[in-house]
Amino acid sequence: MKEKYLFEVVATALAQIEYDGCAESIKKMRKESVSQLLPIFLEFHNQGFISDLVKTAFEKKIAFVLQATTSAEIKEIMKMSVPYYNYEGVVPKGQYHVEEEELMLWFGIVPYCKLKPEANDRISFLFSKFFPKEAPYVLNRI
């Protein structure tokens, strides 16, 4: 599938922003955020991630942007969905965390490092959540 699906999400978001009754400064902030998110998710697409995973993550980020009313919110939304270790396990960080984006980030680092069991557990959890049919076959080979 071509990256066209991402541009469709952008077009829909920009139309929503334009016709929203909020202040021009908020509209501008939202439009800039959408423009900054697009190349990030185009790169996920170009790296070969499953289109549905990329699209879902992108749509969730855009939905957060469309609801944002302050620059502080936008700043948090624009951060990558990197989890943290809370001494019990690896968990999401913040209310704008997108698990699909987190999974793609994990896949980006897995080939380059040895992960602790807690990280492996988190990856297994996310993979099973988003790919329940494939999980038993894939996770048993890791």
Image (cartoon, rainbow, N blue to C red):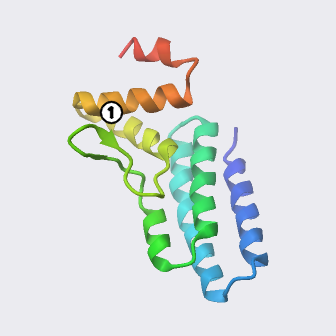
Where the C terminus falls, by quadrant?
top left
Image label count:
1
- Can you tell which quarter of the image residue 51 is in? top right
Q: Residues within 10 Å of mark 1 (few under 14, many from 20)?
A: few
The percent position of residue 107, horizontal first and vertical second, equals 40, 35
Residue 34 placement (x, y as % from top left): 60, 66
In depth, the one of 116 and 45 nearer the eye is 116
Q: Residue at x 61, y 87 (%)?
A: 25
Q: Residue at x 61, y 82 (%)?
A: 26
Q: Secondary structure at mark 1?
A: helix
Q: Nearer the viewer, residue 26 or 110?
A: 26
**Residue closest to the eye, 27 or 32:** 27
The quadrant where residue 35 appears: bottom right
> Residue 100, image x and y in percent?
51, 42
Does residue 129 appear left or right of residue 113 in this picture? Answer: right
Q: Is residue 24 left or right of residue 133?
A: right
Which residue corresponds to the image point at 57% horizontal and 51% vertical from the top-left? 42
Q: Is residue 33 above or below residue 48?
A: below
Q: Residue furthest front?
A: 88
Residue assigned mark 1: 110
**Horizontal side of residue 131 vs 91, given as left or right:** right
- Rendered-image quadrant of the N terminus: top right
User: Please, what is the three-letter code of the amino acid marked with disc 1?
Assistant: Val
Instruction: Using the image, determine if residue 113 lies above or below residue 61.
Output: above
In this view, the residue farthest toward the bottom is 24
Query: Which residue occupies the foreground of this view, 22 or 35?
Result: 22
